[in-house]
Amino acid sequence: MRILIVNPPHRAIGSRIPQEHLPPLGLLCVGGPLLDAGHDVTLLDAELGPLSNDEIVRQVVTHRPQVLLIGHSGSTSAHPIVVELTCRFRKELPALKIIYGGVFPTYHFRDILTQEAQIDAIVRGEGEDTVLKLIAAIEANDDLSMVEGIAFRCGGRIIETPLASTIHDLDAYRVGWELVDLKKYSYYGGKQAVVIQLSRGCPHLCNYCGQRGFWARWRHRNPRKLAKEIAWLHRTHGVELFNLADENPTVSKAIWREFCEAIIAENIQVTIIGSTRADDIVRDADILHLYRKAGVERFLLGMENTDETTLKKIRKGSATSTDREAIRLLRKHGILSLATWVTDFEEVSDRDFIRSLKQLLWYDPDQIMSLYVTPHRWTGYYQIASERRVIQLDQSKWDYKHQVLEAKYMPPWRIFLWVKCIEFILQVRPRALWRSFFQSDQASRHGMSWYLRMGRRVIAHELWNFLLHDFRVSNGPTLREFWGISQDYQEIPLRISRQAMKDVQANENMP
């Protein structure tokens, strides 16, 4: 079949940094198996540019696909533009089959199929195998109810088929790298870049995470096969930087060590960045030199909050002392730390922000990323926050960079000033400036100066939008009224997560 995969443009500032775009790994993962099945597959990456809506529609109409697949990694905040574009696609191409996938549609499929008549089917969960079977059923005009992992309309009813099993062998489906021109993608200061994935899932129980249930069990690729793929991308296509999309790539010390050693054995000079947990870094103190030798230059540490009580409430499973030690260990081995700090999990005051600033300065991270809590209906945290009022009704702003929940005792402008002030102090304090311009390690100096340049632009952009474009409401609906009842019953059962952790630990102890 003639299939067009569309990566819609996103409104987030991260998608607007000139010449800094990463290819859409999730869509490439779906495209590879479709190519191997013999389909005519094209990917339209509208993030590049970005393309205007009119130009996207023009290119779709010119291509005249039989099936259009659409999705975005930031699927909650990208949903409004998906709706807008698919309505226009349907108007221009009435016979087109439109299939929508991602985290947000996986859980909100009933709302979407009820409200958006132009969407024909939704892929729920991982897409590689499900899309293959769905396209085969469409091509053969078979009963779609036999395809696991989808939702669709039939006879005025919404049909939800049983969820497909998670993919056990992540090497069974290849990434369709040929669907994009890899030379068009760069990140981290102009380095030619792609997104890769060693593992999927996470065994930890953080109740605010919107990804854990979607990916379910922690699984990993063959680390040596992935290292060979990285080496091929570097030698054949000139890719310099590899951004790990894993929620937690270092869950298994043995697997991560094997990956680092395999990269080292390939004898290539590449940069690897990603995110992990502070306790994994502390656990791996004896092999951090392998991290750096393999090319790891920065890790984002999801610290989320500086208050021990809040960390326990959101089930983070970490301690502030561990966070600080992880930063120290990374710096000792020449690896930058990017600490994420999430505000307004609970009601906040000026005193809370002062305490957070002191704690963050004590952590002494190289870089800081401040976020606002963004509750998802399928997480446990949604229940906790369900009676808080929503002040941001524009779903495209539900991207972690906008305050969406009301704080009773502080107006949005004061929270915004506190957040930007903390970011500013952390990034222009003498230690951070010295690391940006004068430290001897060239790789770390590059990463610090790039982040400082981008930070200036982001702060200016966010200030401009806060004052003139980010409209908020007072006395808005409660979270429950805005999104509906909780769907945390659809989250992966905690017993499965615990068993996944036991499986990992058992593998660690195998000879």
Image: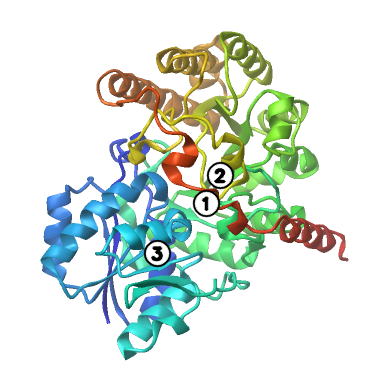
Residue at the (34%, 25%) spot, across then down: 472
Cβ–Cβ under 8 Å for marks 1 and 3: no
| Residue 104, horizontal then vertical, whole percent | 44, 53
Q: Earlier in the sequence, mark 1 or mark 3?
A: 3
**Is residue 341 shown to the viewer in this render?**
yes
Q: Amino acid at mark 3?
A: Leu
Question: According to the image, label 1 marks what residue?
Answer: 245
Q: Quadrant of residue 504?
A: bottom right
Question: According to the image, label 3 marks what residue?
Answer: 28
Name above or below for residue 168 compared with residue 300.
Answer: below
What element does badge 1 sit on?
loop
Q: Residues within 10 Å of mark 3 (few under 14, many from 20)?
A: many
**Relative to 127, is 220 on the left or the right?**
right
Q: CA distance from mark 3 to mark 2?
A: 19 Å
Q: 435 and 50: which one is in front? A: 50
Q: Residues within 10 Å of mark 2 (few under 14, many from 20)?
A: many
| Residue 100, horizontal then vertical, whole percent | 35, 63
What element does badge 3 sit on?
helix
Q: Amino acid at mark 2?
A: Gly
**Relative to 242, is 57 on the left or the right?**
left
Name above or below for residue 481 compared with residue 116.
Answer: above
| Residue 235, horizontal then vertical, whole percent | 45, 60
Q: Residues within 10 Å of mark 1 (few under 14, many from 20)?
A: some
Q: CA distance from mark 1 to mark 3?
A: 13 Å
Residue at the (29%, 17%) spot, across then down: 467
Residue at the (59%, 38%) spot, across then down: 299
Question: According to the image, label 2 marks what residue?
Answer: 274
